[in-house]
Amino acid sequence: MQAFGGDGVTAADTTLGSVSGCTCFRVRKAARRVTQLYDHFLAGAGLRITQFSLLANLRYAGPLTMTELATRLAMDRTTLTRNLRPLQRLGFVAVSVGDDRRRRLLAVTPAGEKAYRAGVGQWQKAQHAVQDELGSETVNDLHRLLERTMTLGGGVIPD
């Protein structure tokens, strides 16, 4: 039987039990749950956490090129483009030509600033809900662990 990876695991060995022990599976499952919680709180502001995060990052560091924002978020450009479309459609993010005509700059518009301000209190409520549920020490440990994961593979994923 063909080995799946260099570790001797074969395709036949990959059962639901082994998948549920997969680090990626567990991180993605937890991310979905946390996303649902934040989306619940942000719904009152008409935003999803993905949208709020983009507005917050652009507001803090912008204007940014698509590549700069994608790098900052550790996100591929295709996913970033898909997530930006609703914000552009709503007039929350504008795209302009940079000093070099090939560069496109993303920036928060006044309407986007208003949406951000409407969401920031709801986001803080979500933050507090997580902290109340898990405790400050656990949340701080989680943040440290998540930051460490950003160095996996030397911080660069090979092509």
Image (tube, grey):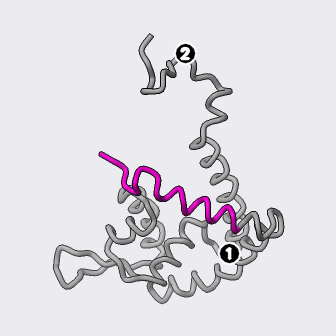
- The residue under the point 61% across, 64% down is 144
Q: Is residue 158 above or below residue 52?
A: above
Residue projecting furthest to the bottom: 110
- The residue under the point 63% across, 72% down is 46
Residue located beneath label 1 in the image: 123
**What range of the chain is rendered magenta?**
140-159
Q: Quadrant of the N terminus?
A: top left
Q: Is residue 34 above or below residue 49?
A: above
Circle 1: element type: helix
In the image, taking residue 91 as reference, residue 106 lies left or right, namely: left
- The residue under the point 56% across, 87% down is 114
Residue 126 place in picture, x, y as percent: 73, 71
Q: Inspect the image, locate mark 2, and give the three-letter code of the amino acid beneath it.
A: Ala
Q: Inspect the image, locate mark 1, and give the three-letter code of the amino acid beneath it.
A: Trp
The circle drawn on residue 12 is 2
Magenta span: helix, strand or loop, mainly?
helix
Residue 66 place in picture, x, y as percent: 33, 69
Asked if the stretch drawn in magenta spans residue 157, the answer is yes
Residue 117 place in picture, x, y as percent: 61, 86
Q: Nearer the viewer, mark 1 or mark 2?
A: 2
